[in-house]
Each structure stands twice: as C-alpha cells, then as structure tokens.
Image (tube, coloured by chain):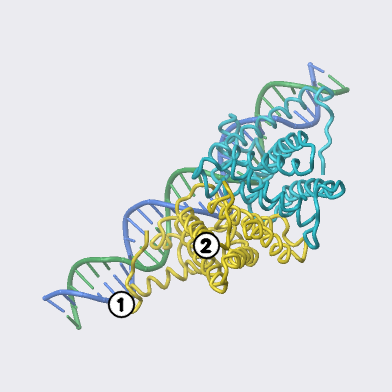
Chain colours: A cyan, B yellow, C blue, D green
Amino acid sequence: MFTEQPPDSERSPQARRLAQTREAILQNARQMIVMQGIEGFSIRALADSIDYTPGALYKYFSSKEALVDAVRADCFEELNNYIAQQVLTAVTTSDMLLLGGLAYIEYARQHPQEYHLMFNMEPSQATSGEQRAIAMRTLLQIVQLGIAQGQIVVQGAYDAAAIAYHCWAIVHGMASLQTTVLLDERHDLPEVNRLILQKVIEGFTP
Amino acid sequence: MFTEQPPDSERSPQARRLAQTREAILQNARQMIVMQGIEGFSIRALADSIDYTPGALYKYFSSKEALVDAVRADCFEELNNYIAQQVLTAVTTSDMLLLGGLAYIEYARQHPQEYHLMFNMEPSQATSGEQRAIAMRTLLQIVQLGIAQGQIVVQGAYDAAAIAYHCWAIVHGMASLQTTVLLDERHDLPEVNRLILQKVIEGFTP
DNA sequence: ACAATCAGTGAACAATGTTTACTGAGCAAC
DNA sequence: GTTGCTCAGTAAACATTGTTCACTGATTGT
C-alpha cells in the first residue's frame, strides 16, 4: 500500500540521485500532461524533454500506465491537501462542507488537466479508486460529526451516507461541467457555485 | 451543420449499399467500444471484425476521430430520445426535471461506456459541445416554463440559469460517480438518486 | 587495483493511425 | 455487347507509438 522509504538524509548519494531523477521525470511528465493533455502524452516525447532514451524511463516505471498513475497520485495528494487546508479554517461542519466543496471546484478550475486525469479516466482502475474512497470516507466523517453535534439533521433515508453522496455529487458535477461544458460561458460561475452549494447545505441544516 | 440526404428510397442502389456499410461500420465500432472501452478501440481491429482492410474505412470516415465522433453523435441522439421520452410522460415541470434527470442517470448506468464517450473525454472538442449546449438549452426552457407557470420560484441570483445548472450538475455528478467510483457499492443507489433529485427540486418549488 | 553493479543506450519489435498507388467489379454510353 | 470510367476496396508502405533486451561504461564497495 505505502512505499515506506528512509528519509533523504539517510540514503546513499546514488540512491538520492536516483530519487531525484525519478522526481524530475514525474515533474516533467506532469508538466507535459498539463500542457498538451493526457491524450497526447507520449513516453518518447517525455524522454526527449529530459534528455533520456525512452528505454531509460523503464528503470523507474514499469510502464507508461505506472508513470501516469504516479502523476495521478501526486495530483490526488495535492488536491487533498488543498481541500484539507480550506476545511481546517472552518469551525462549523456546514462551513467545512462549503469550503471543502468550493476548494474542490476551484482546484478543478485551476487544474483542468489534472482533474481530467483524476476523475475522467476509464472506469475501473485500482489506484485512484482507493484515493477516491479515502476522500469519500473523510467527507462521510464530517457529515457524521455534524450529525453528532446537531448541526446536520437526517430525515429518513436521507441519512449520513446520502448527504455525503449528495455533497460529492453536486460538487463533482459542478466541477466537471465547469471544465468540459461551460468553459467560460458565464463570468460569475464561482458565485453561482457557492450559492448552489449553500442551498444544498441548507437542505440538511436546521 | 446538418447533412441533408435524400430518403433511402430515392437513392441509387450503390448509394444505398454505401450507406449500409457505413452504418455497419458505425454499429460495429460502437459495439467494440462498448465491449472493450474507448481506450482500447482500434481502427484495425474494427476493420478485421468487418472483414475490411484498415484503409477502406477511410473511404467512409476521414479519421479515427471522425469515426468516434459519429458514434458519439449516435449516442447523444439515443440519450436525448431516451430522456425526451421520459419527460413527455410528465405533466408538471417538476416531474419533467425529475424524470428527465433520472432518465439521464439510468442511461449512464446502463451504458457506462457510451456515457464515458460522451462526457468524460478531453476538454474542448467541437461536435459534442454543441449537443451538450442543446441539452442545456432544453433544460433551461423547462425551467423557464416552470417559472412562467408558477411551479418554480426564483429567489435573487438563484435564477432560471442557476436552477438549470444546479439540476444538470447534480444529475451529472450522480451519474458520473455512479459509473466511476461507486460502481456497485450500495444496492439502493437508484432510490437515493431519486431522493436527492427530489430534494433539489423541492428547493425551488413552493 | 579490481570486480561488480546497474543507470542509460541503441537498436529492434509489435501495434497503432494514415496515405497512396493499384485493381477490378459494376455502371453509363454508345 | 463492347468500351471506358468511376470508385469501393486492397496491399503495402510510412511514421509514430509503447516496450524489450543485449550491451556498455562509469560508479562503487572491497
């Protein structure tokens, strides 16, 4: 699950070099994906941009998919950090959901290619499914906290899981539409997003 | 925009044969995409399955992308018909939105690969953007109709456009999560979907 | 100094999308 | 019925992809 590694200072110089070029490969890969999209991303072009031979990359990643997975994992970490950072500034659970959701949308707006990489790929791949499950669990915990504190009220089948699902769906939907359909149709999209998310949250707060 | 063609009976035999093989190509292409996903779809495999040479397909479609676009257009038409069929059974605008939304979700559930093809591809392509715009306009018209009839109430910035956007976002979000994340985690997803969509609709009905 | 490890090379391989010169069956015109 | 032409389909090539593998030479531990 986790690739446990000794801290940088405890590694031999060559191991550090290795890790460094691995990082450089990942960084350039991400940059290329951001610039020209995942669809046109090529191992050979990446090798060129790093001044390596295509085959050399296979000393670091077992396949193109493994490389892309690594980039994706980086993006997920970045997104999770960005959301967590916003959520931590909130005091009420409603604000956690609001700020977290808006952070999600804002990240998608600022990083459309990364968002595409994380959420719009072929159904059924192992790696990112796990990370999304983690995000879902965190979201669920916030909702359950809100319920425990009486800030969120459940009504029948509209329980904690349904509320969490509702929140994720609306946020994901707005983020997705934003990056695909309404690229820049209306200028006040952020305010509308906030308004809608607030309306959703009002639906389960007294 | 539209490729105007004479009805089948008015065409010469060879033209009919042409159109028929074109249709056969499209049909097989879609079947292959459904079975093995867009990512693994290959012109050569398609040619094999139809007992043609790869080059022959270029007499019918100028490129692989053009072929895929044609399949996508077929899917959009199918989806639009499916939704329209459901919407027509509704009397109130609320029910139009509810049934239309559920139809959208149900289509995504039954045709995950087609849905992926229509909505999860690289941002910015001409063809499907247009069709999505049409869908958005239809949705907007329903909302405006509801407002005119007093079945839907607007409050401030939560106007017709915002409501339509809200509906689309929640429906798209649920459909998308359904095909990627929650593949079959909970069995009562359809009921939860209906519940959530009803809650959203309640948010702008008196 | 020596041997060994191993990061990186270069060439090859298979599979992809696409182009192009060609061929031969079917159709219109005489 | 013969002729000639159009054009659907072919075969082979090309460029570009991901991936493999025998090799090599600098780095490294002994």
Q: In the drawing, does residue B103 fall left or right of residue B195?
A: left
- Using the rendered view, name the quadrant where residue B4 is placed: bottom left
| Amino acid at circle 1 | Glu
**Label 1: which secondary element:** helix
Q: Nearer the viewer, residue A180 or B116?
A: A180
Q: Earlier in the sequence, mark 2 or mark 1?
A: 1
> Which residue is label 2 attached to?
B142
Q: Does residue A120 appear in this view?
A: yes
Q: Position of residue A25 (x, y in %)?
A: 65, 33
Residue B35 visible = no
Same chain for mark 2 and mark 1? The answer is yes
Image spot of residue A1 (x, y percent): 82, 44
Residue at screen point 46% across, 67% down: B52
Answer above or below: position of B79 versus A71: below
- Side (left or right) of D6 relative to B22: left
Q: Residue at x 48, y 53 (%)?
A: B129
Secondary structure, mark 2, is: helix
Q: Position of residue B112 (x, y in %)?
A: 63, 62
Task: Report the Cα–Cα distance between label 2 and label 1.
Answer: 38 Å
- How many numbered markers are drawn? 2
The crowd level at tag 1 (other Cα within 10 Å; few <14, some 14-19, many 20+) is few
Q: Which residue is mark 1?
A: B10
Chain name for mark 1: B
Q: Nearer the viewer, residue A83 or B140?
A: B140
Residue B36 figure quarter: bottom right
Q: Residue at x 53, y 59 (%)?
A: B147
Give the residue type that dot 2 points to.
Answer: Ile
Residue A206 image offset from top left, x and y in percent: 77, 50
